[in-house]
């Protein structure tokens, strides 16, 4: 089973189209899949849009009564996938955004990498249609800002929000790590997620993908200065996690398929 995990907040204009495009991808890529959408307290028509799609797609929708933020939403979605699976070493979870920046046509490549033995595959995004030079700059500089706080070997785009995980890696991270697992916010939460999950992975790979910022039907919610400061401030809690769990990576890899 492939769980497509989609955090959503006020994405009524795009979330339905995204779900339908995912369906089209799997029509030509025969794999068993389930769509998991968490509506993080939207106050637009997101709930109404999602209700229509629950009737025609393998879709489960959950909703926060008020907005709790990206990190909480992502972690809850991935925990849902882990709780649902009965084959965590085979099944996987794809994380992608509801604003249509992440192309569903990249999903088959992600899945094939998992089927070939990777445990985590992260898309390294080439931004297209992003008018803000400052946001592009912060995205490129994020690994520098997080140097010494996040360690995901071979990955340069550590704040990408489009990735796939073999569920055993997430299950072990949830079992062994703190609760909640994610202590940071925004782009930094993506980096924290990859850092934590990679400790339980034998192979982490990347693929190149295009992120179409011009397909978003709303203004960007990313303020360049705030994003940079959030990433910078995340260094302390992330470094603390490394000190709290020394040697976790090697032990995790040994245990990965021993169960």
Image (cartoon, helix red, strand yellow):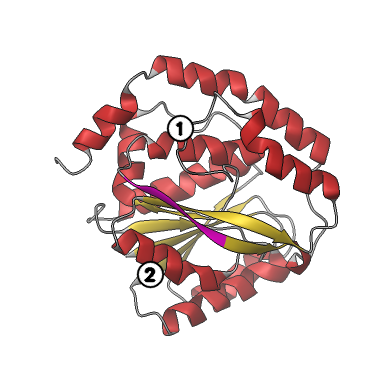
Residue 207 magenta: yes
The secondary structure that dominates the magenta segment is strand
Mark 1 highlights which residue? 181
Query: What range of the chain is rendered magenta?
Result: 203-208
Q: Residues within 10 Å of mark 2 (few under 14, many from 20)?
A: some
Q: Residue furthest front?
A: 154
Mark 2 highlights which residue? 33
| Image: 196 above or below 96 | above
- Picture quarter with the C terminus: top left
Toward the viewer: 121 or 14? Answer: 121
Which residue: 41% across, 15% down? 244
Distance of label 1 from label 2 (alpha carbons): 25 Å
Please tell me whether mark 2 sits on a helix, a strand or a loop.
Answer: strand
Q: Position of residue 65 (x, y in %)?
A: 62, 47
Compared across the picture, whether 92 is left or right of 45 comes to left
Q: Is residue 245 visible?
A: yes
Which residue: 37% across, 61% down? 113
């Amino acid at each position: 089973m492939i769980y497509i995990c989609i955090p959503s907040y006020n994405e009524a204009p795009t979330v339905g189209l995204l779900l339908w495009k995912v369906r089209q991808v799997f029509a030509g890529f025969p794999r068993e899949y389930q769509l998991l959408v968490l509506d993080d307290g939207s106050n637009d028509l997101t709930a109404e849009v999602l209700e229509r799609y629950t009737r025609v797609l393998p879709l489960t929708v959950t909703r926060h009564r008020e907005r709790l933020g990206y990190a909480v939403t992502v972690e809850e979605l991935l925990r849902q996938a882990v709780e649902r699976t009965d084959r965590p070493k085979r099944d996987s979870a794809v994380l992608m955004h509801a604003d249509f920046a992440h192309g569903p046509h990249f999903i088959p490549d992600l899945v094939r990498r998992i089927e070939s033995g990777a445990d985590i595959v992260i898309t390294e995004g080439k931004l297209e249609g992003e008018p803000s030079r400052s946001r592009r700059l912060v995205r490129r500089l994020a690994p520098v800002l997080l140097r010494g706080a996040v360690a995901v070997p071979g990955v340069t785009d550590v704040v990408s929000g489009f990735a796939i995980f073999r569920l055993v890696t997430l299950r072990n991270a949830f079992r062994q790590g703190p609760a909640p697992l994610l202590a940071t916010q925004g782009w930094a939460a993506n980096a924290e997620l990859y850092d934590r999950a990679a400790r339980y992975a034998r192979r982490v790979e990347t693929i190149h993908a295009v992120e179409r910022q011009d397909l978003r039907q709303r203004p960007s919610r990313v303020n360049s200065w705030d994003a940079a400061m959030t990433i910078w401030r995340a260094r302390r809690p992330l470094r603390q996690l490394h000190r709290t769990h020394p040697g976790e990576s090697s032990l995790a890899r040994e245990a990965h398929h021993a169960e």
